[in-house]
Image: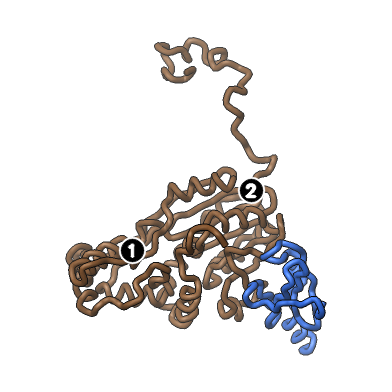
Chain colours: A brown, B blue
Amino acid sequence: MNGPPPVFDRDLLNLRRLRALKTMPSADFLLTHVADELSSRLTLIRRAFSVALDLAGHTGFVASRLAQHPGIDWIIRAENLFPLVKDYPGTKLVCDPEALPFGDGTLDLVASALSLHLVNDLPGSLVQIMRALRPDGLFLGAVLGGETLSELREVLLLAETEMEGGSSLHVAPFVDVRDMGLLLQRVDFRLPVSDSEVVSVTYDDMFALIKDLRAMGMTNMLHARRRRPLRRSTFFRAAELYASRFPTGTGRIRASFEFVYALGWKAHSSQQEALRPGSARVSLVDVLGDKGRAGGEGPAGAVS
Amino acid sequence: MTEEKEKKAEGPDRKLLELLVCPVTRSPLIYDSTKQELISKAANLAYPIRNGIPVMLPEEARHLDELSL
């Protein structure tokens, strides 16, 4: 396949996720938080969805939250690894989020928690989600944003430069909230909304943070990662820098996780749409009268 | 009753099969209930159904040659 080389080593990611499956319960607070957040956003939407997909949500938290919504009749869970869905009691399948096996217009809702930032082709995945949705179907997703682990990124960069005379990528490039908004529009999601939230988590030290990341299956899976492990001394220097630069005041350290939420609808004739520029039939001056004129009492820019 | 339950647990969800297409070619699939496979003639692939769970990954699918069709 042509195109840019893949960013993420998905095979390695899969290994990490399988390993994480064993330890997950201790470190699943981020997923719980995001699943709750997606669910509360859905509560605000007064609409029924007959077929809903929990796309690669890792744990089934999203599916369990979806089940609490009375407007949803049927929930399907899709993961790219068999062990993740094996014991789930509901409808499930194994598929690649970058190659969805759903026919056109088969789903009413696609909910995706913290996995689409790890696909190599996010626009492509969104296009596929769009195709699988019925007209007026909803995409509701959350990905990790660019602020995620910014502290760890910084101290590893500093420590590696200082101790080993060079640096390499340790923290994946994540999605920016503005990029997500543009992407939703580019894929032609209607009434798109994207926003972000930064959650600060405290840890005893950098090693406790890394232990948690490992339990989440979130350690480095970049293709361009350094294949040789960092020296012990580099790690200790990074931990020292972390503690001095990002303290909490109570002897702990803080780590940021940014969640970028995305919401968009597939086009349908019932949705409101902006008219084409220049297609207005009534002049604003007729409506507003003198108030509309520049220098009048109303807002100056109203007729321009 | 238990036998029926076991049978039900083994087979895939028929309603789910109606939604699925081949992820490679986006063409329709044929359900082979004896082999427990979903066959994509366009891609020459047979996707396995394991414990009633469709595994829609091309790398896990069986390649079909002309003869076996």
- Which residue is at a point 30% across and 64% down the rendered structure image? A153
Q: How many marks?
A: 2
Which one is in front, A276 or A107? Answer: A276
Which one is in front, A271 or A19? Answer: A19
Q: Residue furthest bottom?
A: B3
- Which residue is at a point 62% across and 57% down the rendered structure image? A128
Please identify the quarter of the rendering in which residue A215 is found: bottom left
Dot 2: element: loop
Give me the chain letter of mark 2.
A
Which one is in front, A157 or A65? Answer: A157
- Which residue is at a point 20% across and 78% down the rendered structure image? A233
* Residue A132, position as x, y percentages in the image: 67, 57
Return the residue at label 1: A149
Return the residue at label 2: A266
* Residue A194, position as x, y percentages in the image: 48, 49
* Residue A51, position as x, y percentages in the image: 68, 61
> Left or right of A83: which side holds B32?
right
Which one is in front, A30 or B64? Answer: B64
* Residue A195, position as x, y percentages in the image: 44, 50
Residue type for callout 2: Lys
User: Which of disc 1 and disc 2 is earlier in sequence?
Assistant: 1
> Left or right of A150: which side holds B7?
right
Q: Quadrant of the N terminus of chain A?
A: bottom right
Disc 2 and disc 1 in contact, CB within 8 angstroms: no
Dot 1: element: loop
Give me the chain letter of mark 1.
A
The Cα atoms of the two marked residues, 2 and 1, are separated by: 33 Å
- Which residue is at a point 45% across and 78% down the rendered structure image? A20
